[in-house]
Image (spheres, grey):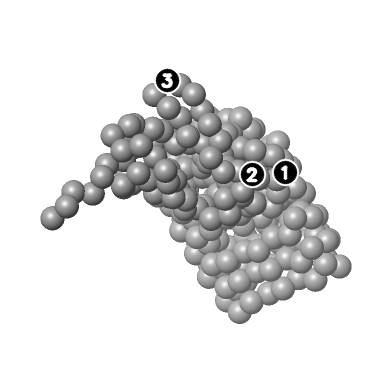
């Protein structure tokens, strides 16, 4: 069963929907600010949760033991995630926490999937909290990850992971002497081909993502050496 809460519901009270054994999808409309303590505790079939940008607080044990929930996306204006808020969401493999979060209670993300990956803003409170409290893998939501390059004849083909919320990307080229040159600052996909390169000359590439009206951090550098295609 699916549940959509209207914007007129600004606060979900304690154990409001706890133990709803047949609930599979939850959508909370814009206007809600607080998900109360244990509001959706022990909803074992809940697989998808869509939360609004108006949300500020996710109280303690709000989604405790929602063991089928596989993706957790905290909205961009949330500041507080209470104790054990997502405890024992054992299927969760992806957790996104924005820079706005300034408090994560103890046990909030304990007992997720062993393969869980956290996406946090570089230098944010969430980054330091996750590193301090857990051993999960983490990546930066405002920084390009997994940049790869394939060389060709006078060209390099770049690909990278999509950054959630990115409006565009900027591609930079680095030379062996250390110079960094902007190639294109309005790239709207996660693929880009740089042409006009000199065969046999090694060059590097780095990417930045434009997220929430600011440029994120540098990606790692990939180096390629374009080569002419050998004739058969």
Q: Which mark is residue 213?
A: 1
Q: Where residue 204 appears, x then y in whole percent? A: 41, 33
How many numbered circles does the render carry?
3
Gap in angstroms between the C-alphas marked 2 and 3 = 27 Å
Q: Secondary structure at mark 3?
A: loop
Judge the density around disc 3: few (<14), some (14-19), many (≥20) Cα neighbours within 10 Å.
Answer: few
Residue marked by disc 3: 177
Give the mark, 2 or 3, whose residue is nearer the N terminus. 3
Give the mark, 3 or 1, whose residue is nearer the N terminus. 3
Q: Which mark is residue 210?
A: 2
* Residue 137 in which image quadrant: top left
Q: Are marks 2 and 1 in contact (CB under 8 Å)?
A: yes
Q: Residue at x 42, y 46 (%)?
A: 195
**Does the rendering let one see residue 197?**
yes
Q: Residue at x 46, y 58 (%)?
A: 91
**Which residue extends farthest top?**
177
């Amino acid at each position: 069963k699916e549940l959509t809460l209207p914007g007129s519901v600004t606060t979900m009270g304690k154990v409001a929907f706890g133990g709803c054994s047949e609930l599979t999808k939850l959508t909370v409309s814009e206007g809600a600010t607080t998900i109360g303590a244990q509001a959706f505790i022990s909803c074992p079939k809940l697989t998808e949760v869509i939360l609004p940008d108006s949300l500020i607080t996710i109280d303690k044990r709000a989604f405790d033991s929602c063991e089928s929930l596989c993706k957790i996306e905290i909205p961009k204006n949330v500041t507080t995630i209470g104790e054990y808020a997502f405890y024992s969401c054992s299927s969760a493999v992806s957790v996104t926490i924005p820079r706005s979060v300034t408090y994560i209670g103890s046990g909030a993300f304990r007992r997720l999937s062993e393969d869980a990956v956290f996406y946090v803003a570089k230098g944010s409170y969430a980054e330091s909290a996750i590193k301090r409290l857990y051993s999960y893998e983490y990546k930066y939501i405002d920084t390009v990850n997994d940049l790869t390059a394939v060389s060709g004849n006078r060209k390099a083909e770049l690909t990278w992971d999509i950054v959630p919320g990115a409006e565009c990307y900027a591609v930079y080229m680095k030379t062996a002497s250390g110079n960094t040159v902007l190639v294109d600052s309005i790239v709207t996909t996660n693929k880009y081909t740089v042409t006009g390169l000199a065969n046999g000359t090694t060059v590097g590439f780095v990417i930045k993502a434009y997220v929430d009206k600011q440029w994120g951090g540098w990606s790692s550098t990939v180096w390629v050496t374009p080569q002419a295609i050998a004739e058969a």
